[in-house]
Amino acid sequence: MLDKKALLSSIPSVDELLNNEEVSNLLDICPRTVLVESIRKYLKDYRSYILASKEINKDELKGNHIIISGIGEYVKKRMDNHLKHVVNGTGVVLHTNLGRSCISPLVLDNLVKVSSRYSNLEMDLDKGIRGSRYDHVEEILCYLTKSEAAMVVNNNAAAVMLVLSTMAKEGEVIVSRGQLVEIGGSFRIPDVMAQSGAELVEVGTTNKTHIWDYEKAINENTKVLMKVHTSNYRICGFTQEVDSKDLVALARGKDIPVIEDLGSGVLMDLTKYGLPYEPTVQESIASGMDVVTFSGDKMLGGPQAGIIVGKKQYIENMKKNPLTRAFRIDKMTLAALEGTLKLYLDEEKAVRNIPVLKMLTEDKKDIEDRAVLLSNKLVSSIWRCCSISVQEDYSEVGGGSMPLCRMPTAVISINSDKITANELEERLRNNEIPIITRIYKDKVLMDMRTIWEDEFVIIEEALKKALL
Ligand SMILES: *Cc1c(COP(=O)(O)O)cnc(C)c1O
């Protein structure tokens, strides 16, 4: 056992370390004040570690060179971006923890220009007077969804809140008990309703709601009938929901507006690509809904945004609601949203160029080909320390969309004699460019559906580092 006192006094001083070449080279990546503070912090933690250790063996003893490289790693990690690119090997296309949808590369140019230079965000260029930021996407949204008016806010939760606050404040909103959704991140229809100042009136039962349930609940305080798409769950068996058209017909007779929260906004029929049926925004508008809300970054495949389409009279009032200022969308988002929506003008172009749609509609054969390509690469470089195989599996849509959909996919399965699957998963996750994987039966799985070909080299290098 070593003498703690002697050990503590052998730790180099901050000045000594600053004179070391390897340490002073760190000034290339961080300012002097940050470097000095980082050294202090590192040494402080090291001293605490020694003081807390019951016994210090020679093996654990950090020589100066270990302290120096430790400082190097600490500073590099500190100066690295905290929010950064990760490789998604989970196969969950809309992974909420991994940023949900990936924006199309085709929209990036304008996004960069609009955000790094001045823009006409709130200027009407024809008239030379103040304009509205909502004008940039209103026309295309109306065109794509066949609605009269449109506006956009920060996310769909804000959209629902704004709609309810504008149309139903201090009144009652009727919703079926089967549609009282909770979305991850604590968005619950009853809570949003309470926050908006509207009173929720639940009708029907969990599995069945009839038109007469709504009819009976309507009174002079009823401001809105609301339909919520059960985007992230399904009720099956002995069930009944009221058809949108019937709901609209009932509401028209009583002069009450009907609104629908669609959650994931789908703008095309995805069944022709082999995906389950998901109601489209166009269908919802065509059924007579007065206002429809949906997300920008779920199945639409754009940036985080809440999109509101519908009748002009309601949307004009929303634009004047003070909440709109608090929920307002920013220019980078608008640029990315406009770009994404423009891709939808040509459906084939959208499917090819919007990553979310591309991944959701990709053929299993193509995914398999990519899996074989990567696995061959890996086998040739790291075969000695692990076994690698390509297997069939299923991927999920994620993001609270198409909950029952299991898409056939190909995964690369890796296991090593040297380290456990948990250790390998952790090492890959802590890679400089983190790689997020799945563990199944003591094997690390990487679903090729959500991995880009230009990420192969990142995976190969990370596995070499983790296993060799
Ligand atoms: C996802 C979802 C929301 C919330 O949308 P965000 O864009 O995440 O705020 C609201 N309602 C439904 C039905 C949803 O599926």
Image: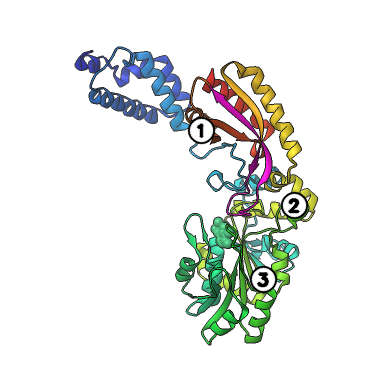
Point out residue 410 in the picture as x, y percentages from the top left corner.
Answer: 68, 36
Report how far apart the C-alphas of labels 1 and 3 lie in the structure. 44 Å
Q: How many marks?
A: 3
Which amino acid lies under the numbered mark 2 shown in the image of this protein? Leu
Magenta part of the chain:
393-416
Point out residue 187 in the picture as x, y percentages from the top left corner.
Answer: 49, 60
Judged from the image, the quadrant occupied by ligand 1 is: bottom right
Residue matched to label 3: 310
Report the disc number at residue 343: 2
Report how far apart the C-alphas of labels 3 and 2 lie in the structure. 22 Å
Report how far apart the C-alphas of labels 1 and 2 lie in the structure. 34 Å
Give the vertical position of 6 relative to 286 (above or below): above
Point out residue 369 in the picture as x, y percentages from the top left corner.
Answer: 74, 32
Which one is closest to the eye, mark 1 or mark 3?
1
Q: What residue is rendered at 48% in x and 24% in y?
A: 28
Q: What residue is rendered at 58% in x and 57% in y?
A: 232
Question: Is residue 247 among what the camera can see?
Answer: yes
